[in-house]
């Protein structure tokens, strides 16, 4: 029974992470949150994104404030360690004492070369009726990445 609760909690945690996946490397993902009437944009690129806009069919640009959530970094893993412990049990009471000694320092295990930025902003009043005429534009370095605006119906 106690394993069932832990398994259910692990599944719930993993499903929460799966509902908000990161975009692929050098990609942009846009979704629509119907409950908040908001658009969520997440961009991943080797260059830092610096500007973003929601652009209407008439060319009107709605500025989007991007927040940097990750930048290129080296991934490290903890060093192996040796642990020593002492314990005792008697009279229905137990106790223990232990300590660990690391063997060496952290090791580099990978390199993430992506900048990841995110923005969440309210949709314009006419978005529900004219969303296919909108697109999202993200400026990365000297280039502009364009993707279709997310559907308010299928999100």
Image (spheres, helix red, strand yellow):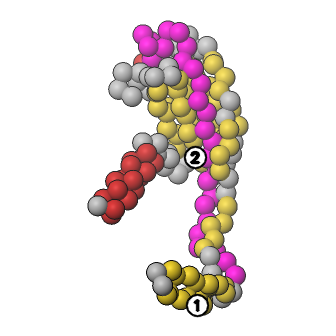
| Rendered location of residue 6, percent (x, y) | 38, 59
Horizontal and vertical percent for residue 82? 60, 89
Q: What residue does disc 2 label?
A: 44
Residue sitting at x 48%, y 85%: 91
Residue 144 placement: quadrant? top right
In this rendering, the answer to whether 43 lies above or below 131 is: below
Q: Which residue is mark 1?
A: 86
Q: Based on the picture, tell me whether residue 23 belongs to the magenta stretch.
A: no
Instruction: Quarter of the image for the C terminus: give it.
Output: top left
Q: Secondary structure at mark 1?
A: strand
Q: Which residues are magenta?
A: 105-131
The Cα–Cα distance between marks 1 and 2, rounded to whole angstroms, is 49 Å
Query: Which residue is more in the foreground, 140 or 107?
Result: 107
Question: Magenta span has 106?
Answer: yes
Q: Quadrant of the N terminus?
A: bottom left
**147 shown above or below 141:** above
Eyeballing the image, is 89 above or below 44? below
Marks 1 and 2: which is nearer the front? 1
On screen, residue 5 versus residue 99, left or right, reads: left
Which residue is more in the foreground, 100 or 127?
A: 100
Residue pictured at 65% horizontal, 50% vertical:
70
Any part of residue 10 in sight: yes
For numbered disc 2, what is the local secondary structure?
strand
Residue 135 visible within the image: no
Question: Residue drawn 49% across and 45% down?
Answer: 23
Position in image of residue 25 (x %, y %): 53, 51
**Residue 8 percent coordinates (x, y):** 34, 53
Q: Which mark is residue 10?
A: none
């Amino acid at each position: 029974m106690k394993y069932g609760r832990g398994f259910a909690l692990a599944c719930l945690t993993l499903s929460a992470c799966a509902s908000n996946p990161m975009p692929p490397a050098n990609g942009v993902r846009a979704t629509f949150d119907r409950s908040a009437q908001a658009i969520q944009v997440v961009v991943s690129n080797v260059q830092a994104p610096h500007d973003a806009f929601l652009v209407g069919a008439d060319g009107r640009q709605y500025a989007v404030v991007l927040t940097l959530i990750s930048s290129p970094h080296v991934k490290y893993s903890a060093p192996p360690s040796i642990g020593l412990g002492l314990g005792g049990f008697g009279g229905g009471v137990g106790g223990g004492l232990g300590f660990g000694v690391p063997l060496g320092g952290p090791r580099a295990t990978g390199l993430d070369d992506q900048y990841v930025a995110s923005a969440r902003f309210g949709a314009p009043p006419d978005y529900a009726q004219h969303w296919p005429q909108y697109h999202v534009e993200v400026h990365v370095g000297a280039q502009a990445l364009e993707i279709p605006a997310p559907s308010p119906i299928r999100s």
